[in-house]
Amino acid sequence: MRIAKDISAKSGLLLMLTVLLAACGNCKKGGGDIECECELPSIEVPINIEIEGAWNIDEQGATRTPPPDAGGGNKGGGGTATISDGWVNAESDIEGVDKVRIVVFRRKDTSDGTGTSEPFLYDVRNDQIINIIGWKNVTVHDTYTDDGLTTDHRHRYGSGTLTKVYGYEYRVIAIAYNSTRTVPYAANGSYNGVLTTGEQNWFDLNIHDGLTLDDFKATIRTQTTADNGTDWREYLTGNSGGLGAPDGDNHLTRKVMACPQLFWGYCHIGDKEPIIRFQTTNGSGDLVDNAPLTGLLYRGMAKVVLNITLQKRAKGTGQNIDWLTLMADHLYTETGLSDYDDFLTPSTPVVEDGKYTSIDYINSASAGDRTLTAWILPTRTRLAIRGRYLWATTHYVDNGQLCADNISYGDMGTGIIAADVADNVFTFRRNHVYVLTCSSSENQFNNHEID
């Protein structure tokens, strides 16, 4: 009996050790860790996200950091389009922003001075998508402007959670987007097999094991149009159903780029310090580990609004514009996401000499006022429109460059100001909206055709 009891006790001890080892062996190792963390203290703290809707405010003559290629660019000609100020409701722009991707990076804590400044590495355990759940009234000083003013307006907000592990420090990046916005020119909810409802389907994050914060970036997807044009409503050919040879496409890259809005921000404890440690000192000098994080997100993109009056053509009768697409000849597809200023220097352009990429589309079979809208990374570019009209029983396609005719100073950052257009090359900056107006008149198309 005694021997049996001893064997039973030893077996129980062996079983207990096996369970502990198995539990420790199941610990997830993230951020380049080589040690098990199953016995390290950890704590969950809330992350409170807010999305800023206000546009940057530029005073007349203010100096700003220009987008890439500010010293060069293509040259345009002529002058038919009217550039004007226009009030754009900033809150309506963020109303559809309903999701936030939270991406976390971490490294060994260096606050004691004994650690090395290793790079922050991607932490898969804290990667999450949270919902924007409502509005809140705020009075704020905009972090990324130097106007010294506070403004009363509303923010969109949502909440997530950060799991901190003792001995590590963190960087928390948040990226907001609209998960219900739909590309207007796609058929059957997809384009070339890519889902087109939801801005999360229009860009990629280069997330992978071992990714450093400094290398974190987003790439906006482009789609190449096929000659059959079925998803493009005769974009290439101008003929019903997309049949026939391409019409006037010599100046097309044959690509479409639907850009997300992309709001960006980093999260902090309240002192604007971007590095989050396991413990921090509060106002009373006590060490606390449960301080909540907050993050205020700003637009990284420029918004381009084209208000256009569709008119009948002068030749014959019944020549209404059927559809229009807004195009640009110099667009960027990549931006870093480690800092808000990364949006000032995007990279990897979609550019072919003298060729345009479509950035928005409207389908309208009658004359009247219409609006084309696109969000793009900061750039210097020419703009053009491509449209189809009906003459008798035949469809024709015209391409026309948008040229600056009336340049006025913007009010509250809502219009083109003199520094933003020269020789019909437009400069578009992050967190600015540009409102353009023009008419699809005979003069617009024939005097400034690009095909």
Image (cartoon, rainbow, N blue to C red):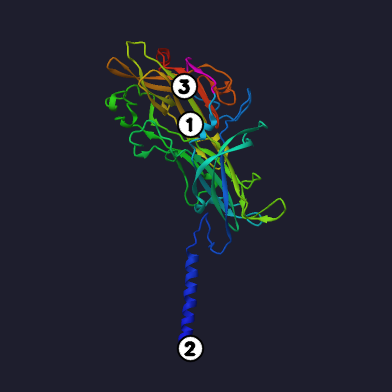
* Amino acid on which the number 2 mark rests in the picture: Arg
Residue lying at 42% horizontally and 40% vertically, measured from the top left: 201
Relative to 409, residue 293 above or below: below
Q: Which of the two marks, 1 or 3, is nearer to us in this view?
A: 3
The numbered mark, 1 or 2, whose residue comes first in the sequence reads 2
Relative to 314, residue 2 above or below: below
Residue corresponding to mark 3: 307
Measured Cα–Cα span from mark 1 to mark 2: 80 Å
Q: Secondary structure at mark 1?
A: strand
Mark 1 crowdedness (10 Å alpha carbons): few <14, some 14-19, many ≥20: many
Residue corresponding to mark 2: 2
Q: Quadrant of residue 361?
A: top left
On the image, the x and y values in percent for residue 86 come to 54, 22
On the image, the x and y values in percent for residue 239 come to 29, 23
The numbered mark, 2 or 3, whose residue comes first in the sequence reads 2
Q: Quadrant of residue 149?
A: top right
Q: Quadrant of residue 147?
A: top right
Magenta span of residues: 75-86
